[in-house]
Amino acid sequence: MTEVDFHKEKKMTRIFIALLLAILCLCFGVNAQSVARDNDKLRVLVVTGGGNYETTFYELFNGYNDLAWTEVRSDSAAFETDIRDKYDVVVMFNRNDSLAEAAQSNLRLFVESGKGIVVLHHALGSYNSWQWWWREVVGGRYLMKADGNQARSVYHQNEEIIAQVVAPHPITASLGARSFILSDETYKGMQISPDVKVLLSTGNMNSDEALAWVSSYKKSKVIVIQPGHARGAHLNLAYRMLVRNAILWTSGRLKE
Ligand SMILES: [Zn+2]
């Protein structure tokens, strides 16, 4: 072996070792990153069952690397056990008149533990007789039937809704506009607490003015969004961002 050959071989060995190290670093780096990403995912429980809706609804949760979402198609099954360690946010999209006492207790434990709550569309018509839920937590209810002086609420399908941002909030800050248009089912004649902070409103005559609000409930963050029935909402970019931001904000992941 000449001296030139020796140096060449030494150089090749160095390059080989450097490459090997680079590959090893890359592998371990990527692994560490994906583990971190999995651990870092927001755990979202989507509770459905009882209401009619278009299946484009599920697109609201698809396409995000930072969300790990699970659907349970029955509220009694969803809250059969204490779920505080399993989820960060519960998205209520169910429509059910009542909930068994044990399930009520588990939902209440979750809500009182400071976790995130997002109430969408027909979930506003759930648990009309559970005062703590609709009055304190949600800050409103769609009346499935008349209650004393309060007439039952009504709905109108395929309405054009101009949603106006009426209060500054992290949820609406990134929408990029003061208003957006969507087509969806509207609710009118709901009972809404004067204590809620309305974020979006509309002048549509077949809708209540309040389209989205923050509940005044103190122990956890609660966002309520009236639309959510059909693809005109689900596939609307602004609506999609609104729901995503609501999930992030109620979990404390969206900067104030
Ligand atoms: Zn609906």
Image (cartoon, grey):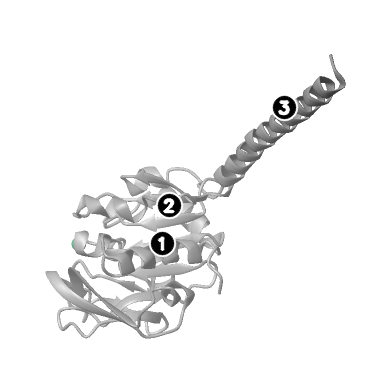
Q: Are the residues tagged 1 and 2 within 8 Å (C-beta)?
A: yes
Q: Is 77 situated above or below 227?
A: above
| Secondary structure at numbered mark 3 | helix
Query: Badge 2 local density, few (<14 within 10 Å), some, or many (20+)?
Result: few
Q: On the rendered image, what quadrant is the N terminus found in?
A: top right
Residue 201 pos. (x, y %): 30, 82
| Nearest to N terminus: mark 3 or mark 2 | 3
| Nearest to N terminus: mark 3 or mark 1 | 3
Residue 27 pos. (x, y %): 63, 33
Nearest to the observer: residue 4 or residue 113: 4
Nearest to the observer: residue 72 or residue 35: 35
Q: Are the residues tagged 3 and 1 within 8 Å (C-beta)?
A: no
| Residue behind mark 1 | 244
Q: On the rendered image, what quadrant is the C terminus found in?
A: bottom right
Nearest to the observer: residue 122 or residue 231: 231
| Secondary structure at numbered mark 1 | helix
Q: How far apart are marks 3 and 1 (CA)?
A: 47 Å
| Residue behind mark 3 | 16
| Residue behind mark 2 | 64
Residue appearing at x 21%, y 82% in the figure: 149
The amino acid at mark 3 is Phe
Picture quadrant where residue 5 is located: top right
Residue 241 pos. (x, y %): 37, 65
Q: Is 74 situated above or below 28?
A: below
Which labelled disc corresponds to residue 80? Answer: none
Residue 221 pos. (x, y %): 50, 68
